[in-house]
Amino acid sequence: MGTKTAAILLTACLLLSACTANKPESAAAGNNQTPAASETSNGNQTDPKDHNSAGKTTTQHDKSVVDNSKSGDSATVAATDKTYHLDKAYNVVPNQDGVEKKVILLTFDDGPKEAAMINKIIDTLDKHKAKAIFFVNGYRVKEHPELLKLIHDRGQPIGNHSWDHIVLKNKSEAEVKKQIETVQQIVKDITGSAPVFFRPPHGAGGDVGRKIAKENGLLYMTWSVGSLDWTMKKSQPNKTDALLKNVTEQLHPGSNILMHELPWTAEALDSLLTRLEQKGYQFVDPQSIEIPAS
Ligand SMILES: [Zn+2]
């Protein structure tokens, strides 16, 4: 199954490579935004998917084993537990018939910022029995390692969102490598396991971002539904209604929903998850998503 999926994805990548030569970050359908601005303008952003190898880090064996048993490092989960994969538009798709299609992947970018906000988000996730990927920036982790530990200890998976939150696609390979690998290391140092998910800042990783992600065993993704929470201002009224509208208008089976660690998103989350459940959606456990071998 893994081999077949990898072959399909490889074919998709090859088919898309012609497009990506001209439009590095925006080849997939339904997308009308410029790559560098994608995380700050339009919510619906896609680009050709990459797949990667199951990279392993080799330090801190004992700590890694302990933490894996607690919160489940994806690298330790058997391949048979991987019931979903990401398609080229970064939607979550079942690997075989009979698996629930009407699922949603929840993600929160740009943290970790504040314990109160993180706890509020995770309280709501727990209430709905949901998991989300927290895509963190290294510079924030360095400032507040205890907040990364909080996310990890509360059982939510951590993703790599680069060290500095800069556009990577036009940077040198050495710089991109540093941006990605320093985050792998600091997260591993604090939690015992390195991330397996990578989301480039601004949705703009470029070929070099995909390459380095792959070399580090990271599944590269942008998103398929933007909550547009990052466009909202503190003074804007009815942000919960706006966020629900933004998401539900784009909603489809497999939606990979981009949100941020923002106070109004934390506030809206219970209403949003309730609405999604009412529409018959389930929340996918990120650990059930295949990290394809190259
Ligand atoms: Zn971001």
Image (cartoon, rainbow, N blue to C red):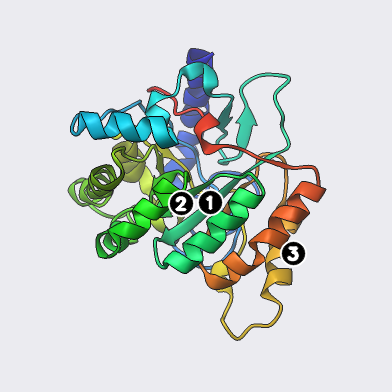
Gap in angstroms between the C-alphas marked 2 and 1 = 6 Å
Q: Nearer the viewer, residue 14 or 252?
A: 252
User: Label 3 sits on what residue type?
Assistant: Lys
Q: Residue at x 34, y 61 (%)?
A: 165
Gap in angstroms between the C-alphas marked 2 and 3 = 23 Å
| Apparent side of residue 15 relative to residue 250 in the rendered image (left or right) | left
User: CB of mark 2 within 8 Å of CB of mark 1?
Assistant: yes
Q: Nearer the viewer, residue 252 or 75?
A: 75
Q: Quadrant of the N terminus?
A: top right
The 10 Å Cα crowd at callout 2, few under 14, some 14 to 19, many 20 or more, is: many
Secondary structure under badge 2?
strand
The 10 Å Cα crowd at callout 1, few under 14, some 14 to 19, many 20 or more, is: many
Dot label at residue 245:
3
Residue at image mark 1: 107
Dot label at residue 134:
2
Q: Residue at x 53, y 45 (%)?
A: 27
Expressed as whole percent of the image width and height from the top left, the position of residue 70 reads 41, 35
User: CB of mark 1 within 8 Å of CB of mark 3?
Assistant: no
Secondary structure under badge 1?
strand
